[in-house]
Structures are given as C-alpha cells and as structure tokens.
Amino acid sequence: MADNNVIEVRNLKKYFPVSSGVFLRRKSGDIKAVDDVSFAVGQGETLGLVGESGCGKTTVGKCMLQLYRATAGEVVFEGQDLCTLSDEELRPFRRRLQVIFQDPYDSLNPRFTAGDIIGEPLRIHGTASGQGYRQRIAEMMETVGLAPYMAERYPHEFSGGQRQRLGIARALVLQPSFIVCDEPISALDVSIQAQIVNLLVDLQEQFGVAYLFIAHDLSVVRHISDRVAVMYLGKIMEVASRDDLYKTPLHPYTVALLSAVPIPDPAVEAARSVITLKGEVPSPINPPSGCVFHPRCHSAFDACQEAVPLLRDLGEGHEVACLLYEPCWP
C-alpha cells in the first residue's frame, strides 16, 4: 500500500445471487454489480466515481465501508484488509470510515433531534460525554453552517440543504480519515447544490479527510474531484486526473459521456456533436463477453467481443481499459 493512500480497493467483486422457482428458490445466476474493480484514494484526495445509473457506483462505496460484504477482492485500510474482519473486529475501524447518504430526508431519524443525530456516533463509540459531548455537537453544527441553538430541533424543521448539513456533521464528528459521499447533492435543489459542494471542499481542507465522491453529474465531479474514475456495468473504464480526463478522454465511453455535458456557451454548444450510444445498457446478470462496452461502442472491432481489456497506465496516472490502447491491438 502506497504511503499516501488512505484506502485501496483490489480486484473487488460483488455478486448478488438470483433465484428462480416459486418454492425451491434455486440459484439461477448472479447479478455482477461490481466485477474486478481496483483503485486507491490518497490522503486528503477526492476521487470522483461516475457512470450511468445501475453501473455499480454505490455498491463499490458500500463494499468499501463493509455495509456489503464483497464476493471477492480486498479493501485495504490502514494496512488491514477489511474484508477479512468480523463485525466485532471492524468496529474500531468504523470510527474512521464514514458515509454521507444521498437522501437527507430518509437518512435522518425523525424521532431524534439534530443534536441526537450528530451525537449518536459519539455515544456509540463512547468518545465524549457530559459537557464535552454537548460542546462537540455545538462545534460541529457551527462547522457545517448551522446555529448551535438548532440542536433541539427535529429533522422536519430543517430544509433539505440543512438536513444534508446535519448528515455531513454526523459523518465528521468522529474525525474520520475517509468518507464515501454517495450522490450527496442529487436530492437537493440546484440552488443549494453548490453550497453543499463548496462546504465539502472547505471541510476537506480543514480536516484533511479523503472522499470517494459518487455522482452522475459530470460538471459537479469536475469541480470537486482531484481524480475521476469512470465506471460501466461493474467495471472501471478509465481513471485519470480531473484535468486530463476532461481535456483528453481516451475511452469511447468517457468520450460519449463528456459529449453530453452542457457547455454554457451557445456558440460552442451549437457547433459540437453529441455522441449517441446505440442500444441499451446490458443486464449485469448476463454481461457481454470481452469488453462489456463493445455492443454500444462506436470504435469496437472483432477482438473486443472476446478479449477482456485490462486497466493499463498510459503515463502520468492516466489509466484506460480499452483494446485500442493495447500494444498488440487492434
């Protein structure tokens, strides 16, 4: 594990069994939600994870936090493979691994006050009590832009943006080193999204925490991420620094995604062409052979139907899984 990496994912797989039959419920196959994914997140870094809905982004995040147990592979955090630990052995690691959920309306207990919500991790892990407990809650509320007197309010008394700030405070109260941000702004009004993104950036600078930022909005990912990983049907297609990916995308899928991002210049927007992918996303129960993207790829050739491309580093950390960049193909 590299010295500056907070967490590493190695050959991660997560398959969900599919059963058939009304009575016997025999296993008939697997949904390959995540299929051989590898990447790392450095200290204080934000790795953006993007892709179409259903490609496995959230499943990757949940496997990293051990909310889902991986079918195969490793999740190495602080030198320890979390996949090999029991629930009891995982407990001390959970203080330093946190999550910000997508929906601030469903992720907060409506029977808890704001203070109870933020303080629950402190109670569970026994890290503060009495005056120190109340002071820590007040500090976290101020940190995320909420007044401490709001600690006695219930979630329904807050706006959507304020609720997400509560979720962020809850994730940060134990001072974790890694947070999975699972589409944390997609359920918010557009006018509030920029505030939450800027808050996350400021908090990262203040606390040095690393983020896995899961999203489908490529414009937001460009603003917050240091590096970006592009995912399709359970596999990583391309990984690069933010500037490299947006300036020189290599994988045909990445090129197609970026062609659909609106540009706030009418002249440029009118002159460019949007790449329309053919067909539909295949089923993860029966993914295509070879490169999983080849049925929809405008650059596919015969070998793409058989050979599985590996994620290859083409220099300066720009990795791509495509036979177009293999030395022996096309």
Image (cartoon, rainbow, N blue to C red):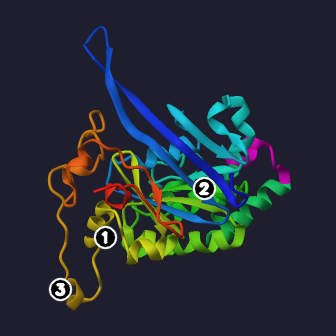
Dot 2 amino acid type: Ile
Label 2 residue SS: strand
User: Disc 2 designates what residue?
Assistant: 179
- In the current view of this chain or complex, which residue is farthest to the front? 328
Q: Is the magenta stretch mostly helix, strand or loop?
A: helix
On the image, the x and y values in percent for residue 149 come to 67, 66
Say what secondary structure mark 1 lies in.
helix
Residue 152 seen in the figure: no
Q: In this rendering, is residue 41 above or below 30?
A: below
The earlier-in-sequence mark between 3 and 2 is 2
Disc 3/disc 1 C-alpha distance (Å)? 15 Å
Find the distance from the CA under tag 3 to the CA under tag 2.
40 Å
Instruction: Please identify, in this view, whether the residue under mark 3 or under mark 2 is nearer the observer.
Output: 3
The magenta span reads 120-130
- Please state which amino acid type lies under the numbered disc 3: Ala
Residue 310: assigned label: none
- Residue 211 in percent (x, y) is at 58, 60
Residue type pointed to by label 1: Leu
Quarter of the image for residue 52 reads bottom left
As for residue 109 lying within the magenta part, the answer is no
Quarter holding the C terminus is bottom left
The answer to whether residue 269 is above or below residue 15 is below
Report how far apart the C-alphas of labels 1 and 2 lie in the structure.
26 Å
Q: Residues within 10 Å of mark 1 (few under 14, many from 20)?
A: some
Could you tell me residue 100's position as x and y percent?
54, 55
**Outermost residue to the top:** 24
Determine if residue 37 is in view: yes
Q: Residue 258 carries which label?
A: 1
The residue lying toward the viewer, choosing from 229 and 302, is 302
Picture residue at 81% right of the left edge, 48% below the top: 127
Of residues 106 and 280, the one nearer the viewer is 280
Residue that mark 3 sits on: 271
